[in-house]
Structures are given as C-alpha cells and as structure tokens.
Image (cartoon, rainbow, N blue to C red):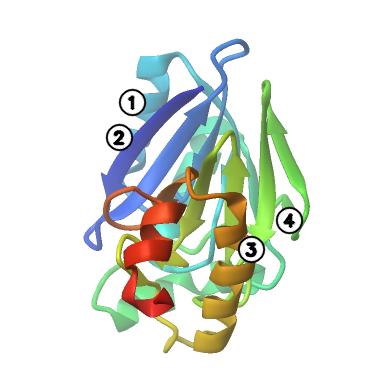
Amino acid sequence: MIIQTLVVGPIQANCFILGCEETHEAAVIDPGDEVPRILQALNREGLKASCIINTHCHFDHVGGNRALKEATGADLLIHAADAPGLARLSASAAAWGMAAEDSPPPDRTIADGDTICFGRINLQVIHTPGHSPGGVSLFTDQMVFVGDTLFAGSIGRTDFPGGDYETLISGVRTKLFSLGDEVKVFPGHGPATSIGEEKRYNPFFR
C-alpha cells in the first residue's frame, strides 16, 4: 500500500492518500485544503483518486472537497449524521476567521460496519462519534485513520455542536482499543501513534 501524509491548511490538518500498488486506485482521506498539493502527490505516485472520504464534517478536514471532486471525479463519502454539515462549511470557517467553500453533497453515505473498497484495499468503517455525530475511523491492515477522535496523548474536542465527551471516550475504549496494541493510529492532526501507546500513556484513558 502507498501512504502519503500531507499537512494542509491553517489549522494543520492531516490529509492522507492511500493507494493500491497493483491498480493505482486511491482514496483521499480528509482533503481539508491545498488541493493542488494533493493532486501533485497523486500524480507523483501515479495514482487516480476513486473516492474522497471525510472522517467528519469540520471545515479543516473537508474544505477541499469541491475542488478535489471537480478535478478527479472521485466519489465523496461521509457518515449520514455529518452530511448536512457539508453545506455549512463557509459559515463554519467564517466563525474562525477563515474561508472555505461549501462542499457538494456526498455521492453516498457510510455507516458503521461498511467496507470501502478501492483497488485491492478494503477499509472498514468504524463509527466513532463524540467529536462530531458522524465521526468515523477507517481500519485496514493494522492501521486506523481516526480523524479527530483520538490524538497522540489527547482526544478531540467535544465542546463543538454535536460533540459528547462520554460518547467519545466510550467509543475509543470499546471500538478502537479493541483493534489491538500494535495497530498504528493516524490522527487528523499531529503525529502518528499506536493503540498500545494510547492505552498506556494517554491521560484520558488511565
């Protein structure tokens, strides 16, 4: 599997490109901004984006949806509970003194237990709300892409509309920690970590 991480936008969100080495199909997870850089990375690896996956609807993770979809024709996927937020990105970004284009609606919504397939790669959808109602994590091959649910040594904020602290903590404990200590965790901001590291050292789970 080809994995590229791009840190994009003023809030420094992680955008991930996952590519199949056999078919050169790719998924782009959370294209928050700087779409020209994302397109350059795809071209550099010889990849064609077949899907754009949003782990949640906050503007710093989805602000590039429209431009990337227009450039690639890729299907846009998000959990149904967060889909309405895609139409409010410009207002949400303005509240932070920033700018973002409203996203097109999803081509399809995803739910807990779904599998997203591209090339030879299968991503298992795990619904992990708490930072947002429709937050999801994406699991494949001993790796999980968690959006803003879990960070190295921390967790996502739960004081935004639709957030819930107890729901987030419970979801991490029951759905993510059960994946296994060796699973590598790719958060929506900051460095990668592992399930084992967060079990042992994250102060929110001691």
Q: Quadrant of residue 187?
A: bottom left
Q: Earlier in the sequence, mark 1 or mark 4?
A: 1
The residue identified by callout 3 is: 175
Q: Position of residue 174 (x, y in %)?
A: 63, 68
> Label 1, on which residue?
40
Tags 1 and 2 touching, CB below 8 Å: yes
The residue carrying pointer 2 sits among few (fewer than 14), some (14 to 19) or many (20 or more) residues within 10 Å by Cα, namely few
The disc placed on residue 37 is 2
Q: Are marks 2 and 3 in contact (CB under 8 Å)?
A: no
**Amino acid type at image mark 2:** Arg
The amino acid beneath tag 3 is Lys
Residue depth check, mark 1 versus mark 4: number of the one nearer the observer: 4
Q: Which residue was labeled with disc 4?
A: 110
Dot placed on the residue nearer the N-terminal end, 2 or 3: 2
Residue drawn at point x = 68 percent, y = 73 percent? 81
Q: CA distance from mark 2 to mark 4?
A: 27 Å
Amino acid type, mark 1 = Gln
